[in-house]
Amino acid sequence: MSEKSNSRLWTPFVFGIALALGIYIGDKLNSKRELSGVNKIEEILNFINSNYVDTVNINDTQDKAIEALLQQLDPHSAYIPAADLKTVNEDLEGNFEGIGVEFRIINDTVVVLKVIADGPSEKAGLHDGDRIIKVDNKNIASIKITNKDVMKLLKGEGGTKVKVTVFRKAAGKSLSYDIKRGKIPIYSVTTSYMYNKEIGYILVDRFAEHTYDEFIEATERLKKSGMKKLIIDVRNNPGGYLETAVDIVDEMIAGNKMVVYTEGRNRKKQEYKTSKKGILEDLQIEVLVNESSASAAEILAGALQDWDRATIIGRRSFGKGLVQEQTPISDGSAIRLTVARYYIPSGRCIQKSYAAGNEKYYEDFSDRENHGELFSKDSIKIDKSKVYKTASGKTVYGGGGIIPDYFVPLDTSFSSYYLNKLFAMNSFSDFCYNYADNNMVKLKSFESPLDFAINYTINDNLLNDFIHYATTHGVTMDQNGYNRSKPEIKNQLKSLFARIAWDDEGLYRTINENDATFKKAVELFK
């Protein structure tokens, strides 16, 4: 029998396991399991364990079967193995336990990119730019260590200690520190700053447990600096807690108004409304979105659009209107099951179709690119059978994301295979951090991140040094690709230098100086 035929015979058997396990899980979750004379799940697993030709990891087989079952439901129901649950939850909980550094492996050496303020490493005395060469007296330099291995060494339970030995170039010697691990905050408001005397900018990269507090803190600081207009950037924001998005919207919409409601077959309608006097009710608001803005980010943009409270700028958002609940399983794993859909104030659900299956669902970005939607507003696929009205009577559509009020096309004019190769080989980061070792005084000689963003330039000598570095580190020079991508190569170098010298504010000020969507927002305010 051929291998291909064999595969066809096993397919229904594997699906049968998945189906049986799914029934078992559903019974457990609802506490309604009816015991029969024979437990089919145990019977199937025991049969495999006793008779299969090779040794089988039954737990792993069970996990994969559960995953297969949930994938048959919708693209966002998911199984989370016990080993992964803590990591998965950390982003939303807004903290993890470790020593408090951002690092990158450069030239087979762990380089500290940033020591997190008030974290264990800062208190112990680590500096940005330190090379970590030993952990608990074990050498980790020049051994082809991976990011995952470094994380295992540095992360750990709060209160435990780890000895870290670093080489500090400025001191010309190695230094050792005993660091007591602790809780490290994960910030979701990545940066905020005043673009000019009136316009403030806040970048929210997800909606986590502490995002609202971070947002309010940033808002109050910007208002003290004279902010009259605000740009909220939720591009590439995958979502998070629905309630967090509602709380932030509540700061911008006056009165008792609907922000979102959820409803499902087994979930009664639950409404979320504004309820307090917000600190942003009198400001002009603009929201930046793109094809990777999803879920809670779409609630924020959609609610503000439906109440005509903000101008939405960018490209059509992802289109996720499904609500998941996370339920723990007795072995420490969990499932996230879709239990409802959410609907924004106009009554529209923005969930895009997943009838063609999960694989097609996640190919949506390439589909948008292929039919031209990322480059032309006229190519946006609109379901004209799902027509809704905003508070002022403006027409909006459901069934596939938030369509912006002002469209900004994706710029691919600088794309080339050569540029992609530079990214793939980490040429930009490796070169920039090596350069900064010897030129930090020059990079920090500017008065502020704004001064750097406006006045620092990548001259031809520095650009040539970078090209030579990339060539000697595995990226063959391609003159045509270089000519096409030269402006973007300079932008990447400048942005990384800004990040190294001036942290996230420097990075995003520099990026936004050349960002078409941001520039459109500023233009519309005028």
Image (spheres, rainbow, N blue to C red):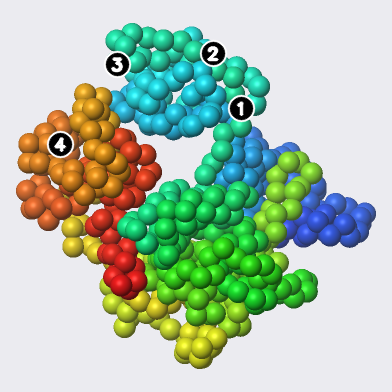
Q: CA distance from mark 2 to mark 4?
A: 37 Å
Label 2, on which residue? 178
Q: CA distance from mark 2 to mark 3?
A: 20 Å
Q: Secondary structure at mark 3?
A: loop
Q: Which mark is residue 466?
A: 4
Q: Position of residue 58 (x, y in %)?
A: 69, 40
Q: Earlier in the sequence, mark 4 or mark 3?
A: 3
Q: Nearer the viewer, mark 4 or mark 3?
A: 3
Q: Nearer the viewer, residue 346 or 464?
A: 346
Q: CA distance from mark 1 to mark 4?
A: 39 Å
Give left or right: position of 287 versus 272. Answer: left
- Please tell me how many numbered marks the rendered image carries: 4
Q: Nearer the viewer, residue 334 or 234?
A: 234
Q: Are marks 1 and 4 in contact (CB under 8 Å)?
A: no
Q: CA distance from mark 1 to mark 3?
A: 27 Å
Label 1, on which residue? 182
The kind of residue on which mark 4 rests is: Phe
Residue 410, above or below 107: below
Residue 401 seen from this side: no
Q: Which mark is residue 169?
A: 3
* The C terminus lies in quadrant: bottom left
